[in-house]
Amino acid sequence: MHSPQTQDNKNSLYIILLISGIVLVAFNLRPAITSVGPLVGVIQEDVGLAHWSAGLLMSIPLISFAVMSSLVPRIAARLSNEKTLLLGLVILLVGICIRSISMTLFIFVGTLLIGVGIAIGNVLLPVVVKEKFPQKFGLMTSIYSTSMGLFASLASGISIPLAHGLKLGWDGALIVWGIPTIIAIVVWILLIRLNPAKDNAVKSVRISAKQIWRSPLAWKIALFMGFQSSLFYITMSWLPEILYNYGISRGTAGWLLSFTQIVGVPVSFLVPILAGRLRSQVWIAFALGMCSIVGYGGLSMGSSYPIMILSIILIGIALGGNFPLALSYIGIRARNGNQAAELSGMAQSTGYMLAAIGPILIGYLYDMTQVWTIPLITLIVISGVVTTFGMLSGRDKYV
């Protein structure tokens, strides 16, 4: 029989490990994707990919997100949240290793597995946070979303130094991101051993009325989720190539992509808090939308360095704020947990399928025109669409 002191120590250790585990999962949800953007030109030269194929490479994880979003809760209902998260991390690690083999087939298969692994984390991390820290949900969400943004920006910045500076090559630079995955796997194995109970499985939610799929507001949120995700992944995929085309070195372009994400970190921390305090989020969506339109507009004006930096800052603010705003809508616009789960599944599955088209489309437009003018005009148009659906979703209504 354990003494109360021993039990308290065990509980304290579990809480510390749990917070560490949540942050470590957050660390792993972006770098395997954001590390590719600065290296995409090098990968294209090495294995001979057209721009549209490179765009497909960046879209495969999004297709995985779309397909897996509705399946993850069913898997977790059988295994438990912790074991399913661990499974996702293992799949992610295998994908990172396979993708680093310098052959087209392995690159695409590895990327597919990376998408499956990250999708599991995307879906379950908010569930675990809501379950384990119900009174501190907002704070913990801010902590893990900020962790995600910081590590994502680091991955973009050090890809070229790892590949060229340390002479690891693009494959070595990408496999480095298996290290935080291994650390996270070890922590979650310990967490499962400390808390082997299976009472934390996701309850299976049946989409009763097809109401969510018939709700105009749900579709507005899904379209907002999809188009803002499309902007994010297009930017992660192609911003370094656009800057390189303007005469910026690949290394500097990678750090500027990193800077774009760092700018968004404080915004991603503040937006959910601000959105939760307001009945209507229309003006938040409008402000972020204007940053996006002006940012991509400035980038289309050419290679003036001051305008380029100002544009990148505005793009960073928009990207950093729109994603947490989309997540906030899922909670704010639903009346209860079941509705939120239905809305989340619908918005993420349809939204990410839409987002997957973005990087391929932009790569195809560049292949057709051989200049970045038309792709950048397309990004301005998408920004307008994001602003419209963000404002429509921000009105004080429920699905």
Image (cartoon, grey):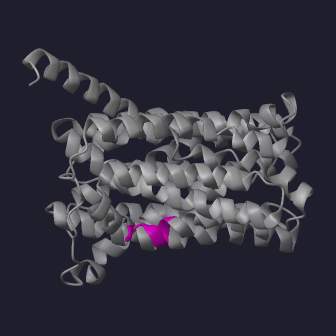
Nearest the eye: 283 or 98: 98
At which x and y percent is residue 218? 30, 72
Would you say residue 104 is visible in this rendering?
Answer: yes
Q: Is residue 95 left or right of 187 when viewed as pictured?
A: right
Q: Identify which residue, 47 or 145, lies in the foreground.
A: 47
Residue 351 seen from this side = no
The quadrant in which residue 177 appears is top right
State left or right for residue 221 relative to residue 237: left
User: In the rendering, at what x and y percent does residue 389 appear?
Assistant: 41, 67
Above-or-below relation of 228 to 309: below
Q: Residue furthest front?
A: 1
Query: Where is residue 259 shown, x and y percent of the image?
Result: 64, 34
Residue 270: % across, % down: 36, 36
Above or below residue 244? Residue 205 is below
**Residue plotted at (24% across, 60% down):** 202
Residue 317 falls inside the magenta stretch: no
Q: Is residue 398 left or right of residue 223?
A: left
Task: Answer with the quarter of the image where residue 153 lies.
Answer: top right
- Magenta residues (range): 65-71
Quarter location, residue 237: bottom right
**Residue 251, above or below 203:** above
Q: Nearer the viewer, residue 101 or 205?
A: 101
